[in-house]
Image: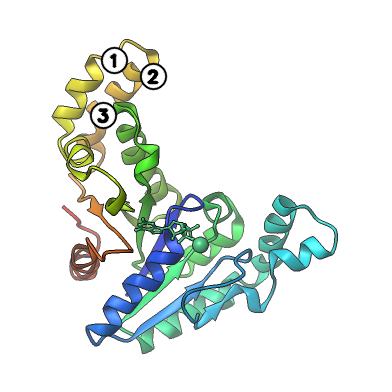
Amino acid sequence: MIITFVGTAGSGKTTLTRAFGKYLEEKGHAVGYVNLDTGVKRLPYSPDVDVRQDVTAWELMEEGLGPNGAIVGSYDRLVPKAGDYAERILKLESERDYVLMDTPGQMETFLFHDFGLRLMDGLHDVLTVYLFGPEILRKPADYCFVRFFGLTIDLRLGTTTVPALTKVDTTDLERHRKYLEDVDYLRARLKLEPSMQGLLAYRLCSVLPELSPPTRVLYISALTGEGFEDLETVAYEHYCTCGDLT
Ligand SMILES: Nc1nc2c(ncn2[C@@H]2O[C@H](COP(=O)(O)OP(=O)(O)O)[C@@H](O)[C@H]2O)c(=O)[nH]1
Ligand SMILES: [Mg+2]
């Protein structure tokens, strides 16, 4: 089974790839690792498939491009190879119990670039885990934002996406849990918001139950291992039920 970690730069994708992989290995599973980040210099795990074998962002910087141009340019060069990478990842999947895919630091290069989309088109039944840190959850509308962002990843990649709050070792988990799990509570709080943003969030959250089943939210710390069992369970259920994560 293939699990892809997607999230903004610094949300914890690489750290979780390493920590969750180690957890699975300690339980006796064979784990394959895929690095899709052309811009990373050092990885805490040994990738079995690594896009840096073909191109790195820093070699394009040496050719004179700035950091953003180098990142985009590196994925432009990878586009013709997307099918090959998909095949290599599928082969790795056939040899291992789990394949963990660590995606580009900047999420947009995966979600908006042809390379990421073509690669995902070549894979089947991928479980995508959308990682977001507690620092982006400041007001009630933010909880609505992350729920919808998870859905837009589904829409974009055509995979099943489960939202995961990361770095829970750094935050007051119970407060986040209530907003993320109890849509009625969230709506009640949003109703009190006088802004247009609050009104939009209220309306969006009102249609959330219609748009998606009550998806489970994961609460994870790559440092303490909290939530790893739940992630393993969700991955297992995904492969047994083909996408029903209620
Ligand atoms: N406290 C805490 N820090 C974390 C956790 N996961 C990642 N980090 C830190 O967050 C930073 C970014 O992590 P990284 O895995 O490189 O993020 P990426 O850009 O999404 O791959 C690093 O300094 C990590 O040590 C976590 O679960 N708890
Ligand atoms: Mg990373």
At 31% from the left and 10% from the top, the residue drawn is 194
Q: Quadrant of ligand 1?
A: bottom left
Mark 3 surroundings: few (<14), some (14-19) or many (≥20) residues within 10 A: many
Residue 85 place in picture, x, y as percent: 55, 76
- Tell me which amino acid carries mark 1: Glu
- The CA distance from mark 2 to mark 1 is 8 Å
For label 2, the SS is helix
According to the picture, the residue beneath numbered tag 2 turns out to be 197
Q: Which mark is residue 193?
A: 1
| 125 sits to left or right of 245 | right
* Disc 2 + disc 3, Cβ < 8 Å: no
Q: Which mark is residue 205?
A: 3
- Colour mode? rainbow
Viewer-nearest of discs 2 and 3: 2
Viewport quadrant of the N terminus: bottom left
Q: Residue furthest right?
A: 64
Residue 81 visible in the current orientation: yes
For label 1, the SS is loop
On the image, which quarter does residue 245 sit in?
bottom left
For label 3, the SS is helix
* Disc 3 + disc 1, Cβ < 8 Å: no
